Structures are given as C-alpha cells and as structure tokens.
Image (spheres, grey):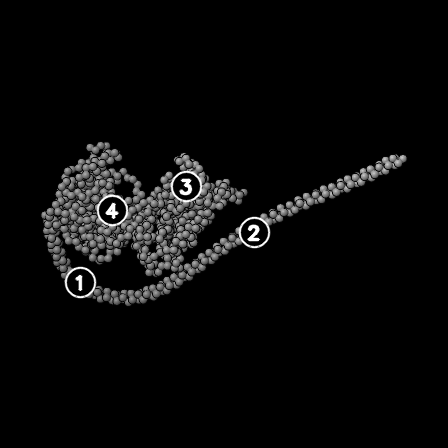
Amino acid sequence: MRADRGQQSGKTVQGMRGQRLAIREQQLQEAEEQFQEVARQWLTKERQIQELASLIQTKEQQLQDKDRQLQAKDQQVQAKDQQVQKKENQLQFKEQLLSANEQLISTKNQLLAAREQQITEQEGQLQAKAQQVGELNQQLQEINHQLSVKQQLQAKAQQVGELNQQLQEINHQLSVKQQHLDEILSSRALRIGSTLTWPVRKLRHSRLLSTPSALASNEITTTPPTHVIVEEVVESRPLAASPARNVGRLVIGVVTFNNSKEQLARLLRSIEIAVRNIEEAQVKVCLYFIDNGGESCWPESSIQSKRFKKQGNIGFGRGMNILMAAAFAEEETEWFLCLNPDGVLHRGAFKELLSSSKVHPDSLIEARQFPEEHVKPYDPRTLETPWATGACLLIRRRIFESVGGFDPNFFMYLEDIDLSWRARLAGFTVRVSPKALFGHAVLHRKPDPNVDKSFLLSGRYLAFKWNNSDFCKWAERELVKRKYYQSRSELPELTELNTVSTETNLEPSDFNHYFHFSQPRW
Amino acid sequence: MTYDNTRLSVIVRFHQEARLPFLDEAVFSLAIQDWDDLEVVIVLQNGTEKLQHAVEAIIHQQPWPDSPQYKIIIVPIAEGVDGRSTLLNQGIEHATGRFLAFLDDDDYVYHHGYVTLIRQLLNGESVIAVGGCRRALMQPNDDHWFIQTKDLFFAWGRTRLDLFRENFIPIHSYVIDRSRLGDFKLYFDDDMPPLEDYDFLLRLCAEFEPDFTQFETPVCEYRIRLDGSNSLAYVPDAPPHVIAAQKRAQRLIRERKESLISIMPAADIVKLKEGLLESISERRAEDGNQAKHAQEIDEGATLYKPELDNRVLLKITQDIYLFFSRHPDWERRLSNTLHIGWRTYKRLKKRESRA
C-alpha cells in the first residue's frame, strides 16, 4: 500500500512537474511571442526611422538644391543689376552727347545769325555800288557818243602798230631760239643719235610751224622719226643745257586711248584741285593732249588746254614726244609732266613734284603710285631710284634738251625705263617724290595677252638696245612659247643702229630682275 | 530697318590732329574707289571746330566722282577713356548706307576693294564678305614714311573657326550688308577696347557665316609704323594701365567665346571634331607614340610641335578643341550642340510656331 501510495505520490509529483513544465513552456512561448512581437515592432520602427532618415536626406538635398537655385538667381540679379548700371551709364553718356549737340546747334545758330547780318550789310553796300556803277555807265555812254568815228580810226591805227611790234618780238624770239638750237646741235653732249637729235629737229620743225596762226588752230603736223641712232656718250653732263628756273610753265601731257568721258573728267578735276594747291603764283599750268584712239571727250575746265592733231595709234612714247616737243618749243615751258589718263592726282601732287624738282633740278622726278606703290627700290634718304615710271613723271627742260624724249621704237611699255637709264648715263639722276601721290589702279588687273605681248616686245628691244643678249633671247623665246609668233624668224627686225655702243658705260641697265629691272623691295 | 539703296557707308574714326596727313591718304583712297555710291562718316574724338574745318578741307579737295557725301561727327570722350567703340557706334548710328565698312585713319583701301566685296555680297547670301589684307611695314624718315616691305601676314586664317581662335580679319577688310541682319544689332562693346573689333566679329560671325570667297584678293593695307606709334591691341612695352586694359580685354574675350560656344552651328563642331580626330591619327601615324599623345590630350596640353607640325590650320583646330575641353561643361555643351544644334533648334521652333 505504502509502495502504492509512494508510487501514487511519485506519480502526482511527476504530474505536477509536468504541469509546471507545461506552464513554463507556455510562458516561454508567450515570452518568445512577445519578443518576436517586440522585434517586429523594433524592425518596423527601424524601417520607419530609416524612411524618416531618407526623407530627411531628400529634404536636405531639396533644401540644398533650393539654396543653389537661390544663389544662381542672386547671381542673375547681380548680372542684371550690372546691365542696368551699364545702360544707365550709356544713357548718361547719350545725354551728354545730346547736350553737346545742342550746344553745337546753338553756336551754329549764332554763327548763322551773324552771317545773315553780314550778308544784309553786304547787300546794302552792293546796292549802293550798283547805283554808282549805273551813274558811271551813263557818263561813259555820253563820252562814247562824243568820241564816235575819230576814235575808231585812231584805235585801228594803234592796233596796226601793236601788231607790228608783236611781229618784231616774234622774229627776235625766233632768232634767239635758232642760236640756242645751233648751240645744242654743236654741243658734244648730244650723242645719243636721233633719240636726242630728233627732239631738236622737232624743235626746229615746230618752230617753223608754231606761228600764231598754226598754234591758234592747235595743229602741229610733224612726223616722228622712223628709227633711232644711238651713239657713244663722251661727256656725262650736258654742255648746252638751259639753267634751271624755278618759274615758268608746267605743261601736262596726256596721250589718250579710248578713255571714257568719266575717267577724263575725274583726271581733269584732280588736276584742277592740284593746281589750286600750288603755292607759287609764278607757275602756270596747261594741258596738252593727243588721241591715239577715238576722239576724247573732256569737260570744260579752268585749265588751259590744247588738243593736237590725231595721227592714229602711234604708241605712248611717240604721242608723248609730240606733246613734249611742242611744250618745250615754247620758251616759257620749264617742266613737262607725263601723265597717264587712267589715274588721278592727289591734291598735293604738283606742289610736291615742283618742290622736289627745285631741290633736285638735275633729276627726273617721279610721283609715288598710290595706293600700291611700285615695288622697285629707292633710297629713303636721297630718294634716288634706278628708274622712273612714265605714269606721272616730271621732266625739266634741261633734261629734255640733253637727253631728249622717249625712244619712239618702243610702241608701249618700258620706254620710261630706257629714258631713265639714258638720263642717268648723261649724268642726271632719277628720284621719287614720296609725298606726291598719283592714284593709279595697278592691282587686280585681268591678264591681257596684248599687254603681255607688248611687254615682251619692248623687253626684247630694251635688251637689244642695251646690249643684253641673254634677256633679248629669253624675250624672243617667250614670244614664241606664248604663241604670239610662230617662230623667231617672224619677229620684227632689230637694226644695229639702235644699240648703245659697247664702249659706253652700261651701268644704269639692270636685266637681272626680270621685268622689275631692279631689286624689288618685296 | 530697310535699305533700298546701294550706298556704302564707310566709318572713319579719327583720334588726333597730328594724324591729319594719314587721314588725307585714307580719304584719298576712298575718293578713288571704283564703287561710286559712297558716304564717308568721319567720327572725331573731342574735335574742335578748327579741326572739323581741316577735315572738311581734306574731304573737299579730293577727286570724288560726284559731289562728296560725307558727315563729320564730333564725339566728346573723357580724358583717360578709350573711346574707340564709342566712336564706331556713333558712326553706325549716323550711317545711312545698306553696306557698311570701317576704316582707321592711318590705313587705306585699294581701288577695287569695296566693289569686289559688295559684288560678292550681292552674288551670295552672306551678311559679311571678307577680303584679303596686306601688311605694310613703314620706317620713319625725314618727312615721309618709307615702306620697307609688304606681306600677306593675315593670310594664316581661313574659316570662322580660325577666327574663334584668334583674330585675323582687320577692321577695314570686310563689308557688311545691313539689309540681311534681321534683329541682330550691330555695336562695338564699350568694355572691350583694345579688342573691340575682335569682339564685334566674334558676335557677328557666331550668328552669320562669313563669306571668305574673296579672301585671296587683297583689298586693303594694314600699315604698321616701325617706330611703335600705331595704336595696336598688343604692345609689349606699354605702360601699366595699357597692359591692364589689354589683360582685361583678353579675359572678356575669353568669356565672350565661352558664351558663344552653345550657339555655334552643329556643322562647325562636327568639322572641328573630324579635324581633330584626323590630326591625331596623322600625328600618331607620324611618330607612332600613341601613349604620349593620349597623355597630351588628357592633360590638355598643346599638341603643337613646331618640329613636327607645319600645318598651321591643323594647329588652330586643335587649339580650339583644347579651348572647348578646358570649359567645365564642355562635354554637355558639345553633345547638346551635336544632337540639337542652334540652327536646328531655331528651325524646330519655327515649325512648332507654324503648327
């Protein structure tokens, strides 16, 4: 029984322990559930915190962005402020301008009023003078009536006497010229054949023709020489050259070739302006021209001009020689200006050319081509240059009398180089007048086969004349190569009479720089 | 503004009385122009009435084809202020011609200069026609200026991109057709001297493609006096305030270029990119040093090497590329411009507004 009881009590204890364990397990389960619940809650809260943190971050970013935007806007506002300030400054400046303009207008108005007053005063004076003139006219008419027939007869008698005196003066001048020419011819300086003697013959010829009647009709009918004889030059200085005068007449020579009316009008206008700027009243200017093409049309002008009889297309040099010879046949001519019709003179051109000629009376004086000056060199101190272009070239009487005009064997181009070299050979110099401008379009010209051919033919002749066989042969080869001639045998003949003597100093000539005929500056 | 005329207005700015002989030659070059319908607007800086008369005398004693059309404007400029832009702006306001050109008082234009450029404008559609310019180096002498030599100094550039790198277009070497400007306002920035002419060209040429057809034809001369008396943009031994002004202008020009990048046409950028790639491949082919050139590009160092590169144009293209690459947003700007260029954008806008 006891054992049963013991067993029973043991069983009850075990049952109680089991109950307790079950209860603890329940409690543990509950605790675990609670823990899990808490953990869930913690996780959710952590998530919430994370979400909040991310929200805070995004908001911070948004705030930063907004700050940046605000900064950018501030900068824009500052920039706009600056613009506004700038515009204000501009407005202020414009106001200043306006006030200055107003002041100008008021001063101009005052000037106008003063001028109006002067004009009214002058009008009054003119009216008074007109009345006086009217009275004088009436008196004169009365006197004229009284001196009718007798005075007319006396006047005619006086005219006859004056004409006689003029004739005597002309005869005297002719005899002086004859003596002068004889001196020139007898001088040893004139040794370059007909290039030099031709102008002298021309002077003689023109002297015979330059009677008042012939000059009045503006006709000089001379024939240029057909060939040139170049002889040895023994002396470099002219013996019979006229002394340089700083007074006299400047004759402008223009050879036209189908130049337009507008072109000639512009040239003439530039001549008029340049004449007005000559300071010396003792220098008179007149214009001689000859037409190598169609009859040129010149507008009316204050410049005295003379048209010479057309002789066909005789070339630049021959045309210019006719004008030059006629100009220097008249004793009062001291300078001759070769001038191209396709250019215009600067207002100070004559003033500067004449000034240079006075400082350097033994020089051919060349104007500076503008705006593209010639590439050939010149000494910036002495202004000496190897040769001068004939586009705007001032020739003094004494140089013409010694050297002559252009060699008529050149039809076109390079005759100016030949003249320059001959002048240098004769002891003269060639200079640039850098402030005398001649507006001449030489850039951007279209290539012209006729010009090219003329250049080569003239180059050939120049080289032949100045004994440079290499250049001469080169020019001949080029003439054939460029198909201007079929063969060299077709080329125009060159006569030995035209050459410069080999004993002569050939120093002025330079055939080493192609058609530059001197070392170019650029 | 509409222009129903063929008049060319030439604006000449004149600073000092001592430069009257130069002005005389400049005006003579205008008087002998082949283009007859010409208006000369001379803008005097602080000119007196006496000076005005002297300038009038110069104008009246020129061989104009007809009676001269001219205006003389006096602009007061405070002492110490560089009034170059102001003078030109006043000239533009007073000019009446459809065509516009500028001339400094010590330079000149050749006979055929304006007629060549205006014909080019009339034959094409551009706003600005650019001609060639020769540089003349002048040495002072007793009473005249001796021209030592002339060269084509400005011929190194050829395109709008070259202009973006450095100015090679002197102010008197172009003519502008004002009838084609639209809303674009012509002005010289008062802040920009001594680089006001460059700034003007940058703004104008960013908007309109310049016509370089006549660039081979010299139309004018830029005369450099060897005694240093020119008013040049860059003077090495200049006083401090002049150097400060130069530096300031250079900074402003850099800023201007940056502001203009985004409105450059896509075609130009494509050309730029192609030119760059080509040049790099050529250079790689030349010496095979790929790594070195890649490093050079990365570092943004100049690619130009005188011993290797005799192609000046190439150097210019590379320099512009490097200029772009130095900009902080260059990639974005470049890609934006490549995808939708400024002109394309404008075209799209037009279509949108029509729809």
Residue most toward the front?
A2
Dot 4 crowding, Cα within 10 Å, few <14, some 14–19, many 20+: many
Tag in front: 4 or 1: 4
Q: Secondary structure at mark 1?
A: loop
Q: Earlier in the sequence, mark 4 or mark 2?
A: 2
Q: Secondary structure at mark 3?
A: loop
Q: Earlier in the sequence, mark 4 or mark 1?
A: 1
The quadrant of the rendering that contains the C terminus of chain A is top left
Residue position marked by numbered label 4 in the rendering: A377
User: Tag 1: residue type?
Assistant: Ser
Tag in front: 2 or 1: 2
Chain under numbered label 3: B
* Residue at position x 44%, y 48% in the image: B254
Q: Report whether residue A203 is seen.
A: no
Dot 2 crowding, Cα within 10 Å, few <14, some 14–19, many 20+: few
Task: Say whether mark 2 and mark 4 are on the same chain.
Answer: yes
Disc 2 + disc 1, Cβ < 8 Å? no
* Residue at position x 26%, y 53% in the image: B141
User: Tag 4: residue type?
Assistant: Pro
Marks 4 and 1 sit apart, C-alpha to C-alpha, by 71 Å
Residue position marked by numbered label 2 in the rendering: A67
Q: Quadrant of residue B283?
A: top left
Tag in front: 1 or 3: 3
Q: Report whether residue A430 is seen.
A: yes
Residue position marked by numbered label 3 in the rendering: B303
User: Which numbered circle lies on residue A148?
Assistant: 1
Task: Say whether mark 1 and mark 2 are on the same chain.
Answer: yes
